[in-house]
Each structure stands twice: as structure tokens, then as C-alpha cells.
Amino acid sequence: MIDILMPRLSDTMTEGAIATWHKKPGDAVAPGDLLLEIETDKALMEQEAYDAGVLTEILIPEGENVAIGTPIARLDDGSGTTPARVVTSASDQVRPAASVPAQTITRQDPAPAETTRTAATPLVRRIARERGIDLAEVPGTGPGGRIVRADLDDLIEGTSPRSAAAPEPASPARSGTVDGDLVPFDATRRTIAARMSEAGAIPTFTVTSSAEMGELLALRARLNETTSAAEHRVSINDLVVKAAASALRAHPEINASYSPQGGGATLVHRDVNIGIAMAAPAGLVVPVLRAPDSATITTIARSTRAFAARAAERRLDGADMAGGTFTVSNLGMYGVEHFTAIINPPQGAILAVGAIRDELALADESVGVRRRISFTLTADHRIIDGAVGAQFLRTLVHLIEEPLQLLM
């Protein structure tokens, strides 16, 4: 008998939620079979079986969140003994349970597995339970017909959040109370909250500069005229990422992290790996482009589009979001002209990119319209000084205004 344990699927993962069991008790299991899907702090990830046998018991039902190393199911391999199997990453070999701290778990026996079950994320299941929504009647628009949060929006607008058994509304005499709907955090949102709380303790400074966009917009138009492939079409953000990576090479002090070693130290990274902040159904995700300073602009465009598609389907894995040394966050597509981004620890800096705007400018004794964009750098003041941040922005602005250098 083998205890299957909650695996570690990313460097930052401490717990995971069971999203979907693809096997039920009594099913035969072969190595390589898709056993279950796990919702981690980063993404929804598939977990394969590493041993052959019969699944005898599911210990943790769908929707529940447990720590790494917790037994989640039992597999009868015919051996009669009960070693545990834990996987520390999706590609690691099976390791004995001795490497996992012992844990005591008290719970009731799980309910019998359903013969059929609608595919939905744990967050959707929780909301459906709270709202009394029958998921079997909801058409799913996610991958494989999975029901995602957006599929419930229209139903929620017409569904009362309170059941008949719910408590009466608070009396108006109870001043200071506010009625509302409690939406529990999923694994991704919990991680975002924890990391933003960590970032809030970092002493930071911000510097802002702006660049004239005429040359960059013309270059982008020329590049897109030369390709008919949609995945090769270049966005403004692709060019900004390329420029930021080149500026980091010129100012390696910005491409750094704080280290507490020896009472405090600056870790200057050899590689330039830029995280691209993206909005996804479960919240903010930051997939990482590796060495974009040495990549072509069309390669950056293709990689960014692939990340965005996988983020929308919650198919990014831990490797996609590991190893970033700097982050670019662009809200310009929402019409935001200027904002201050929060550092993504342990990185030392983040660049906020605003919308392109029209400004009146005086040139050759005549007034004309110039198109400009704002950049705001937020930096960890423990390792980066204001003058260094200003020099980085000056280089970035120069590359934006003289973009042919990005093709060299």
C-alpha cells in the first residue's frame, strides 16, 4: 500500500488545493496516468501517477487545501506495506516519506467519490455552494469545458447570496456593520496577499520619467507590416520589455536583490530575466522572459502571447514564473497614465508603464502634438540609490526615443 502525498510543485509552494480527481476509488492506475489536478500558489497543475496499482481511497476531497507532505490518497500496489510517495517537483523521481516531516491529521472519512463530476475550479465550487448554484446546469468556457469564475457572473447577478436558512440581516441599530459577500481566498490570492504584505515592509523610493513615442510607434508599425503571423506581431509592451532589459545590462545595480547574508548584501544577478505582470482569472501572475536583452523583438512577442494564453487557462507552471530578476507592469491598455507598482520580492525593482497620451509641445516656434508615455521605477532603497534609479530611467528613455538601437 502506498500513501500518495501532496507534492511540492514550485519553489514557493507550501500547500495545495485538490482541484479535480481524475481517478476514483477502485480504478486501476498505471505510471504516467493523470491522477489529479492541483491548484498551487501559482497555477493549476496536472499530477501523474508514479506507481502502478489500484486507487483504494481518496483522503482529501476536491476543493480542500492541505500542506505539502499530507497524505491525499492511497494506492494498493500489492506489496502489503505502506511506504509513502512524495514528489518535490513535476520532474523529480519518487522519494521516500522519510524526507517529509511527520504530520498528524484528524478528519472524518471522505464521502464516496461521485460517478460523474462537473469540471470546475475550487473557487467556483465554493461560490456555487454559497450561492446554491447547480454546476451541472452551467456551461463551462474554460479548457476542456471547465467552469471558471467568469461563467458564474450572470448567474450571480440574478441569484440571492442568502439562502432561506441564512441569518437575518443585522439590525440597523448595530452601527458600523456593513453587509457584503465573503469570497474566500484561493491559493493564488493567498500568495499574492502574503507577498504584497512582505513587499510593504521594504523601504522603497519611486522615480518617474517620460519619453516621446513617435519613433517607437513608427518602428512598431514597420515591424508589423513585415509579418502576417499574428503571434509575431509586436506590441508596445514587447518593445518596452526589450528596452528595459537593455537598460538593465547598462545598469546592473538595478538588476539585483537584497540578501540578509552577513548583516545585509546586494545580490547582483548575472542573468537579466524579466517578469511580465499579467491579469489572469485567479489574479496577478508574473511569467518570466529569460534574457530578453539578447532575444529578437518577435521572439519576445511570441513568448509573451504564449504566456498570456496559458495564464488565461491557468496552465502556467512553476518553471514559467521562477527566476525573475526584474518586473515590468503595464496598465496603459486600461487608460492609466501613471501609477506606482509594488516590488515583487525578492527582486529589487519594478517598472510601471502608463498609457500613451497626447501632449502639446512647442517645436520650431510652433505648437504641435507629441505622443508621450510615463515610466515609474519603484526600487528597494536598501540596495539601490535614487541617483542609480534616475540613471536607469534616462537610459530607458533614450532607448525608447531612439528605438533602432533595440534591433542591433
Image (spheres, grey):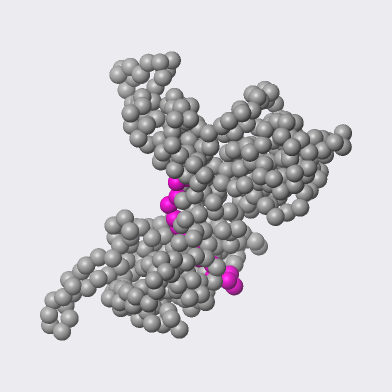
User: Any magenta on residue 280?
Assistant: yes
Q: Camera-side residue: 365 or 243? A: 243
Q: Position of residue 248 (x, y in %)?
A: 49, 73
Residue 396 occupies quadrant: bottom left
Q: Please count the marks in the image.
A: 0
Q: Position of residue 97 (x, y in %)?
A: 79, 42
In the displayed structure, 370 sits above or below 11; it is: below
Q: Quadrant of the N terminus?
A: top right
Residue at position x 62%, y 31% in the image: 61
Q: Position of residue 253 (x, y in %)?
A: 52, 72
In the visual, does 67 lie left or right of 290? right
Residue 55 occupies quadrant: top right
- The span shown in magenta is 269-282
Residue 36 occupies quadrant: top right
Residue at position x 47%, y 69% in the image: 300
Q: Camera-side residue: 358 or 128? A: 128
Q: Position of residue 38 (x, y in %)?
A: 61, 43
Residue at position x 65%, y 24% in the image: 112
State whether residue 133 appears in this view: yes
State whether residue 380 appears in this view: no
In the displayed structure, 241 sits above or below 99; it is: below
